[in-house]
C-alpha cells in the first residue's frame, strides 16, 4: 500500500485546489500516468502517479484544497487487498454563496470534524528532514509541513525559528488550521486579532461591517490566483517604498516600422508583432546599464543581489486571474524571437497550460494595460523584484517639435521602483534612455 | 468460565497492560480521559516485565557478574570459586519483577485508571466482549489495541516439552547441554545465561549471520567473544527433526545438505514472535491485519477504524518495548485531540550479549540496500583509556553520517555498556545533529562515552587519538 503525498510543487507553493481526477477509486493506474490536476497559486499542474497499481483511495474531491505532504491517493500494488486507511480530510473549498439582505436567524450548520485531521508528513521515505523532535511538534501544532520550510541550521536542519517564520509568512489559513476552525466567522475574528497585534503604529484593522444590513450582497471565496495576487501586492506595498517615474515616448517612427514589418511577417512565428517586444528589448538594454533595477534586496542579510541574467515577466490577464509568465534571456534574443515567445506564453497562459517553472525566476516585470485604455498608471512592483514598467495606451497627440505643433504617437511609460535600492536620478536616466531608443527604431537596432 | 453480566462504558478502552498499554493508559489519564485498561494476565507489565526484558536482564546481570569475577584474576583478584544458587537467583529475579509490576499498579491507581482482568474481543467498532472477567463487555469511544505478541513455535518440535524463552527464564533445571534454536537476540541472550549457569550451549541459526538487522562489523566482534562461551555456533543450519529421548532430545540439524543428529539435554526455541491479533474479533471491525498478523496504522497509530488504534508489537515495526511506549503516548495524545505523530527517526536496538551490541538509525547494511551514500567513522575501544581501565578493549563505536552535510544518520556500537551509550547516538539522530555537534560536546574523561566523540572525529577526518598514517620517507 503506497500513500502518495502531494509532492513539493516548487518554491513557496504549499497547497493547491483539486481541479480534476483522472481516475476513480478502484481504477488501475500505471506509473507516470496522469493522476490529478491541481491548481496552485501559480498555475495548474498535472501530477502523474508515482506507482503502478490499483487506486485504493483518493484524498479529496474536486474543489478541495490539499497541502503539500498530505496524502492525496493510496495506491495498492497489484495483488494487495484494499483496506481503507483513515485519510486526512482535505479542506473543502467554500462555494460562492449569496447572502440574503436579512441575516439568517438560524445558527450555522455544525461543522463536521474530519475523520482524521491532516497530518503533515515530512519526507520520511527519503532522507528525513533534520529537525529536533520539539521543532517537529511545533510544526505539527502550527499546521506547517516541515518539508516546505526553508532551513537555516547546519546540514539543512530546521530550527523552531524557521518554523515560526514560515508559519507567520506563509498562508494565513493552511488546510489544517482551516479545517479546525472551519467557521469563517471565527477564523476571520482570529485573524483580525492576530493582525491587530502586528507592530505597525496606527494600523487599524477592524472586522468589516455586515454589509447585508444595507442591501443584498454576494460573497465569493478568494480563489487560488486571486488570493496569491492579494498577498503579493500587500507584501510589495508594505515592504517596498515605491516611487513612480513617468514619461512619454514618441513611438511614431517605431510604429510605422512595426506596422510595415508586421504586414510583411504575417503568419510567421513572431509575426503578430506588437509594441511589447520592442519595449522588452529597450528595457533589457536599460537593465544592462542600470543594474540596480535587475536586482533583489534581502533585508535580513542586508544584501543586494544583482542578477546577471535578464528574464522579463509579462503580466497577462488570463480570465482566471493575473499571472506573470517569464521571458528568458531577453538579452540574447531578437525582437522577433521575443515576439514569438510572448505569443506562445500568452496563449498557454490563457489556456492554463503553463508549467510552474515558466512563472518563476523573473528579474523585472512589464505590465501593458495600454490596449485596454488609460493615459497613465502606477504599477505595483512584483516582489521580490525591484522595478516594474507600466505601459499606457499609445495614441496620437499634439506635441511641440521645433516650435511647431505636430501630431505624434505618444506612449505613456511609468517606472515604479524600489527607493531602497535606487534613487530618482537612476530612474530618470533609465526611462530617458528608453524614451530615446523607442523614438528611433534604428537606435534600438544599434544599441539595444 | 467466569462470565460477568455487567457492562461498562468508557471513553478509552485499552487492551493489554504491557509497556504499550499501561503507558497509553497513564498518558490518556493525564490528558483528562476516562480510561479502562483490560489485561488478560493476573499481573501488569506484559511480556516485557513478566517474562521478557526485565527477568532476562536480571539473570544476565547475575551471570555477567560471575563471569567478571572469574575474569578478574588477571587484575589480581581471586574469588574462591564463584557459585550460583539457581533457586536464590530465581527468587531475586522474581522480586525485581514483583517490585516493578506493583509499581505499575500504583501508578495506574493514582491516575484513576480502572484495571479489569479478562480477555477482550471486538463485537463491533464501539464495543468489546470480555471473557474470564467480572465484566461482560465494554462500550468505548476510543480503543487502543496493545495486545503484544507471542512466541513462535518450532514446527519440528510441535507439542514437545522444549522450552520457550518464557519457560527458560523460570530456570526449571540447568541442563548439561542446551540447544538454542535461533541466533537472534533472545537466543543469544538466553544462551549466554545458560552458559553462565554451567550448561554446554549450542546455538543453531538458519541464516549465515547472527542478529539479522545488525551490521556485520559489530556482530563479528561479539561473535569472537561469545563463541568462547558456547560449545558451538552453527550457522546456515536448520533443525529438521526433534525427538524425545530418555535424557533429553535427539535433534536432527541440517547443514549444507547433510543432516546430523545430536543429543541435547534441553532445547530452547527462540525463533521470533507473532502479533496477538488472530483472536481479537477483528473480523467484526474494518481492521485487516496483514499475513504476519500486523495491523496497518498511520502516523497517528490509527487503524482503518478511525477510533481504534494499534501500538507496540501488533503495529508495524520492530517488536520492542520502548517503541511501544512511544507509540502509546502518540495514540493517547491523538485521542485527547492533541497534535501528535510517531515520526521518530531512530528506534534503538540493544542486544545484551557480552559485549553488548546496540545500534540506532541507519545501518551500513540498510544504506547499502537502499543505495544511500554514507560516511563511516569507526573508533576502536582499544584506543580508549576507560576501556583499558575496565580491561574491556574489544569493541568499537561507529558513526554513520551524510557525506556532505555531516548529518548524523546512524550510530552502531559493540562493547561494554553499549546499551547505555546508544542513547546519546539516538538523541543525536533525532535532533538532526551533525558530526561537529558530537565533536565539540565535552564528554567526561575517562568514560566509554568518549568513544562517541572520537568516532565522530574519525568520521569528520579529524581523529585525535588515532595516529595519522605514517609518512613515507
Image (cartoon, coloured by chain):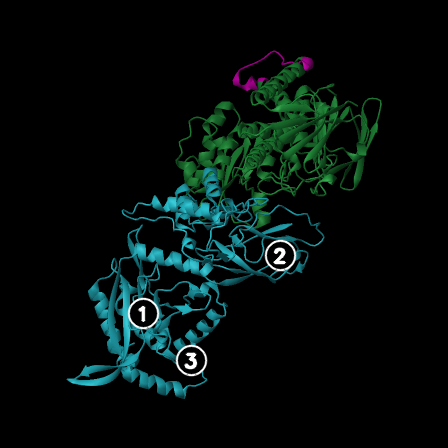
Chain colours: A cyan, B green
Q: Which residue is mark 1?
A: A390
Q: Position of residue B456 (x, y in %)?
A: 45, 38
Question: Which chain is disc 2 placed on?
Answer: A
Quarter location, residue B175: top right
Pick the front one: A360 or A406: A406
Disc 2 or 1, which lies upstream in sequence? 2
What whole-number distance in Å separates the C-alpha atoms at marks 2 and 1? 47 Å
Q: Quadrant location of the N terminus of chain B?
A: top right
Q: Residue at x 65, y 15 (%)?
A: B89
The image shows residue A319, relative to residue A5, as above or below, that is below
Q: Position of residue B38 (x, y in %)?
A: 67, 27
Q: Residue at x 39, y 85 (%)?
A: A262
Q: Is residue B72 left or right of residue B171?
A: left
Residue A366 bears which disc, if any?
none
What whole-number distance in Å separates the C-alpha atoms at marks 2 and 3? 41 Å
What whole-number distance in Å separates the C-alpha atoms at marks 1 and 3? 22 Å
Foreground mark, 2 or 1, reads: 1
The number of numbered badges drawn on the structure is 3
> Can see residue B460?
yes
Question: Which range is magenta?
Answer: B69-87
Q: Quadrant location of the C terminus of chain B?
A: top left
Q: Which residue is mark 2?
A: A51
Q: Are marks 2 and 3 in contact (CB under 8 Å)?
A: no
* Tags 2 and 3 on a common chain: yes
Farthest residue to the left: give it.
A403
Residue A270 bears which disc, if any?
3
Disc 2 or 3, which lies upstream in sequence? 2
Q: Is residue B85 magenta?
A: yes
Amino acid at each position: 500500500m503506497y500513500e502518495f503525498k502531494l509532492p513539493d510543487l516548487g518554491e513557496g507553493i504549499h497547497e493547491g485546489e483539486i481541479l480534476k481526477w483522472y481516475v476513480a477509486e478502484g481504477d488501475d493506474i500505471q506509473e507516470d500516468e496522469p493522476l490529478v490536476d491541481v491548481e496552485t497559486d501559480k498555475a495548474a499542474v498535472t501530477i502523474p502517479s508515482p506507482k503502478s497499481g490499483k487506486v485504493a483511495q483518493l484524498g479529496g474531491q474536486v474543489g478541495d484544497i490539499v497541502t503539500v505532504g498530505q496524502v492525496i491517493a493510496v495506491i495498492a500494488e497489484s495483488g494487495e487487498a484494499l483496506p481503507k486507511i483513515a485519510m486526512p480530510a482535505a479542506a473543502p473549498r467554500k462555494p460562492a454563496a449569496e447572502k440574503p439582505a436579512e441575516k439568517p436567524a438560524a445558527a450555522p450548520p455544525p461543522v463536521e470534524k474530519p475523520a482524521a485531521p491532516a497530518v503533515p508528513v515530512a519526507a520520511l521515505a527519503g532522507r528525513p528532514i533534520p529537525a529536533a523532535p520539539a521543532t517537529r511538534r511545533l510544526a505539527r501544532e502550527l499546521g506547517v509541513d516541515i518539508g516546505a520550510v526553508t532551513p537555516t541550521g547546519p546540514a539543512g536542519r530546521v530550527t523552531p525559528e524557521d518554523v515560526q517564520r514560515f508559519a507567520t509568512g506563509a498562508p494565513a489559513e493552511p488546510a489544517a488550521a482551516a479545517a479546525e476552525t472551519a467557521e469563517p466567522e471565527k477564523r476571520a475574528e482570529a485573524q483580525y486579532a492576530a493582525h491587530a497585534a502586528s507592530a505597525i503604529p496606527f494600523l487599524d484593522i477592524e472586522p468589516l461591517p455586515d454589509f447585508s444590513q444595507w442591501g443584498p450582497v454576494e460573497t465569493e471565496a478568494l480563489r487560488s490566483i486571486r488570493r496569491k495576487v492579494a498577498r503579493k501586492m500587500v507584501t510589495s506595498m508594505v515592504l517596498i517604498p515605491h516611487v513612480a517615474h513617468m514619461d512619454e515616448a514618441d513611438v511614431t517612427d517605431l510604429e510605422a516600422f512595426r506596422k510595415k514589418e508586421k504586414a510583411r511577417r504575417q503568419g510567421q512565428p513572431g509575426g503578430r508583432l506588437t509594441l511589447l517586444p520592442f519595449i522588452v528589448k529597450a528595457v533589457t538594454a536599460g537593465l544592462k546599464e542600470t543594474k540596480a533595477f535587475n536586482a533583489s534586496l534581502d533585508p535580513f542579510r542586508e544584501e543586494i543581489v544583482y542578477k546577471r541574467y535578464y528574464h522579463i515577466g509579462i503580466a497577462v490577464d488570463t480570465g482566471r486571474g493575473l499571472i506573470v509568465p517569464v521571458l528568458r534571456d531577453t538579452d540574447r534574443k531578437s525582437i522577433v524571437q521575443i515576439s514569438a515567445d510572448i505569443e506562445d506564453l500568452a496563449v498557454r497562459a490563457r489556456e492554463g497550460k503553463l508549467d510552474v517553472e515558466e512563472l518563476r525566476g523573473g528579474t523585472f516585470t512589464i505590465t501593458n494595460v495600454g490596449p485596454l485604455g488609460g493615459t497613465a498608471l502606477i504599477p505595483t512592483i512584483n516582489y521580490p523584484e525591484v522595478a516594474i514598467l507600466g505601459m499606457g495606451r499609445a495614441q496620437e497627440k499634439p506635441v511641440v517639435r521645433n516650435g511647431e505643433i505636430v501630431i505624434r504617437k505618444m506612449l505613456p511609460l511609468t517606472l515604479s521602483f524600489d527607493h531602497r535600492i535606487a534613487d530618482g536620478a537612476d530612474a530618470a536616466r533609465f526611462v530617458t534612455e528608453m524614451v530615446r531608443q523607442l523614438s528611433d527604431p534604428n537606435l534600438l537596432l544599434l544599441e539595444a | 468460565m467466569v462470565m460477568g453480566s455487567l457492562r461498562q462504558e468508557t471513553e478509552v478502552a485499552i487492551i493489554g497492560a504491557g509497556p504499550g498499554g499501561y503507558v497509553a493508559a497513564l498518558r490518556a489519564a493525564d490528558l483528562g480521559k476516562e480510561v479502562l485498561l483490560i489485561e488478560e494476565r493476573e499481573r501488569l507489565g506484559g511480556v516485557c516485565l513478566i517474562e521478557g526484558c526485565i527477568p532476562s536482564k536480571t539473570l544476565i546481570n547475575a551471570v555477567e557478574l560471575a563471569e567478571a569475577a572469574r575474569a578478574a584474576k588477571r587484575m589480581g583478584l581471586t574469588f574462591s570459586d564463584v557459585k550460583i544458587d539457581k533457586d536464590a537467583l530465581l527468587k531475586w529475579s522474581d522480586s525485581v519483577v514483583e517490585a516493578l509490576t506493583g509499581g505499575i499498579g500504583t501508578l495506574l491507581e493514582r491516575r484513576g485508571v480502572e484495571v479489569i482482568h479478562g480477555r477482550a474481543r471486538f463485537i463491533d467498532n464501539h464495543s468489546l466482549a470480555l471473557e474470564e472477567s467480572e465484566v461482560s463487555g465494554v462500550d468505548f469511544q476510543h480503543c487502543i489495541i496493545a495486545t503484544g505478541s507471542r512466541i513462535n513455535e518450532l514446527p519440528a518440535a510441535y507439542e514437545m516439552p522444549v522450552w520457550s524463552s518464557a519457560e527458560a527464564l523460570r530456570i526449571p533445571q540447568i541442563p548439561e547441554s542446551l540447544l538454542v534454536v535461533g541466533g537472534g537476540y533472545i537466543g543469544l541472550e538466553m544462551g549466554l545465561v545458560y552458559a553462565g549457569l554451567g550448561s554446554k550451549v549450542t546455538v543453531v541459526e538458519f541464516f549465515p549471520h547472527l542478529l539479522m538487522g545488525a551490521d556485520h562489523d559489530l556482530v563479528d566482534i561479539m561473535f569472537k567473544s561469545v563463541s568462547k562461551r558456547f560449545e558451538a555456533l552453527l550457522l546456515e543450519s536448520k533443525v529438521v527433526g526433534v525427538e524425545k529421548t530418555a535424557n533429553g532430545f535427539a535433534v536432527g540439524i541440517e547443514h549444507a545438505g547433510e543432516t546430523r543428529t545430536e543429543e541435547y539435554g534441553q532445547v530452547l526455541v527462540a525463533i521470533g514472535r507473532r502479533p496477538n491479533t488472530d483472536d481479537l474479533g477483528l473480523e467484526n471491525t474494518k481492521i485487516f491485519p496483514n499475513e504476519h498478523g500486523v495491523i496497518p496504522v498511520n502516523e497517528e497509530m490509527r487503524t482503518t477504524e478511525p477510533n481504534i488504534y494499534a501500538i507496540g508489537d501488533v503495529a508495524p515495526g520492530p517488536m520492542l518495548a520502548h517503541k511501544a511506549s512511544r507509540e502509546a503516548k502518540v495514540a493517547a495524545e491523538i485521542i485527547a485531540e492533541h497534535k501528535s505523530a510517531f515520526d521518530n527517526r531512530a528506534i534503538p536496538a540493544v542486544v545484551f550479549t557480552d559485549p553488548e551490541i546496540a545500534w540506532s538509525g541507519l545501518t551500513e547494511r540498510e544504506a547499502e540496500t537502499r543505495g544511500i551514500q554514507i560516511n563511516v567513522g569507526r573508533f576502536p575501544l582499544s584506543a580508549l583509556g576507560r576501556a583499558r581501565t575496565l580491561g574491556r578493549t574489544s569493541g568499537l563505536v561507529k558513526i554513520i553520517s551524510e557525506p556532505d552535510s555531516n548529518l548524523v544518520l546512524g550510530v552502531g556500537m559493540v562493547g561494554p555498556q553499549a546499551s547505555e551509550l546508544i542513547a546519546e547516538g539516538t538523541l543525536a539522530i533525532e535532533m538532526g545533529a551533525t558530526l561537529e555537534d558530537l565533536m565539540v560536546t565535552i564528554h567526561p574523561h575517562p568514560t566509554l562515552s568518549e568513544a562517541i566523540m572520537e568516532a565522530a572525529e574519525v568520521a569528520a577526518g579529524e581523529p585525535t587519538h588515532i595516529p595519522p598514517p605514517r609518512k613515507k620517507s
